[in-house]
Amino acid sequence: MKTRNLILLTTLCLLACTNQRKKQDISTQPTKQNKEVHYAKGFRINRFKDYTQLIVRNPWDSTKVLDTYILVDRNKKLPAQLPEGTVVRVPVERVAFASSVHAGMWNQLNKAQRTVGVCEPEYFSIPVIREGLKQGKIADLGMATAINIEKLISAAPEVLIISPFENTKRTEFEKVDIAVVKDASYMEESPLGRAEWIKFEAAFTNESKQADRIFGRIEKNYLELCNKVSATKNRPTVFTEKKFGDVWYIAGGKSYLGRFLQDAGANYLWKELDQSGSAPIAFEKVYSKAIKADYWLLKYNDVHTDMTYESLKNEYNLYANFDAFKQKHIFAINTGKTPFYESGSMEPDLVLADMVHIFHPELLPGYKPRYYFNLEKDK
């Protein structure tokens, strides 16, 4: 009896497995699954015979999926059966950007000319986009946090690419049948991980091979610099940014900025801060911890003039008490004159080179910085 029951159970299991396979169309078997993403943790690419599936992980809950995109060749008939997700015909011919970061990726892929709308155009410096805005061919969609829906409808993009924030809603976009693509690259914990999102963007333009070449070059340069730094024993202390109001937003030790500083051979004072984002810390605590730091790195935005040690002191006189101020070891990026947010995420090798030049100048003799400049010495 036991033998008969065992045979019956085995038969039922085999039938169940057989039925499950029959229900699964052969076209749903991936031909290439997540083998082209090596550093980025926030997305994966699954390539199938009739479509490509892009899965974006929820940055705030890694057990969940934030969104899924099903990319289908625009010149082929839409498959009868597709998995759940936002269907996008590729290559995308009309795109809108809520952030200049993503436009920078499309520019590297030579596809920025497909832009029909942007948010906060003052942050875009790509020539073809600036010219399009000037001629009225590219719409000003307003603030990224309050997009002008009427202008968006008029621009008629096929996709709108945004940086998602926790609890982001897209109800208003669904009403106008615009695919909202959530690029969460800013949540990556490593510079190479963030740069690898160019492969995500390239899937919408059919430029995956080009993206592989671009990222391959970035990866090679970045790792070569890391190798140079690895032999150095000196690790100067460093802190970053300025106070905002009554607090100082400090990047966590697991943030991509924290990783940059580590790879550049510096001793980041908040490397033990166990988070990938930033944390508000009282000025007094930052003051006491960073007062003797060797270096100070920061960013500011001024399209008219560059910051000096004197103007920084005038902004808040206690800044002058930091050793980094006294030793003239403050290096800054003027985002009003340098397209750091537009191109920096896709040039981590150059950002790292700037940092290595700051902390270990002997490793890069004759180097000319791209982003970070001493407040006065490099002028």
Image: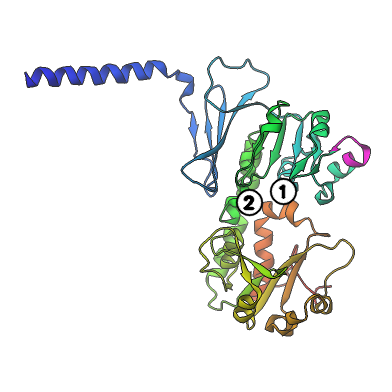
**Residue 250 sits in which quadrant?**
bottom right
On screen, residue 87 above or below 325: above
Q: Which mark is residue 186?
A: 2
Front in this rendered view, residue 213 or 145: 145
Residue 39 in percent (x, y) is at 53, 50
Identity of the residue furthest to the left in this view: 1
The residue where tag 1 is placed is: 101
Q: Which residues are magenta?
A: 132-139
Q: Secondary structure at mark 2?
A: helix
Neighbourhood count class around disc 2 (C-alpha, 10 Å): few under 14, some 14–19, many 20 upward:
many
Kindly identify the residue that appears in the image at 19 percent across and 20 percent down.
Answer: 9
Mark 1 touches mark 2? (CB < 8 Å): yes
290 in relation to 170, above or below: below
Task: From the top left corner, tell me how far across and down residue 362 is, in percent.
Answer: 65, 76
Judging from the image, what secondary structure is the residue with disc 1 in?
helix
The correct choice, above or below, for 59 with respect to 371 in the image is: above
Whichever of labels 1 and 2 marks the residue nearer the N terminus, that label is 1
Q: Residues within 10 Å of mark 1 (few under 14, many from 20)?
A: many
| Residue 364 appears in the figure | no
For the C terminus, the quadrant is: bottom right
Give the residue type at disc 1.
Answer: Val
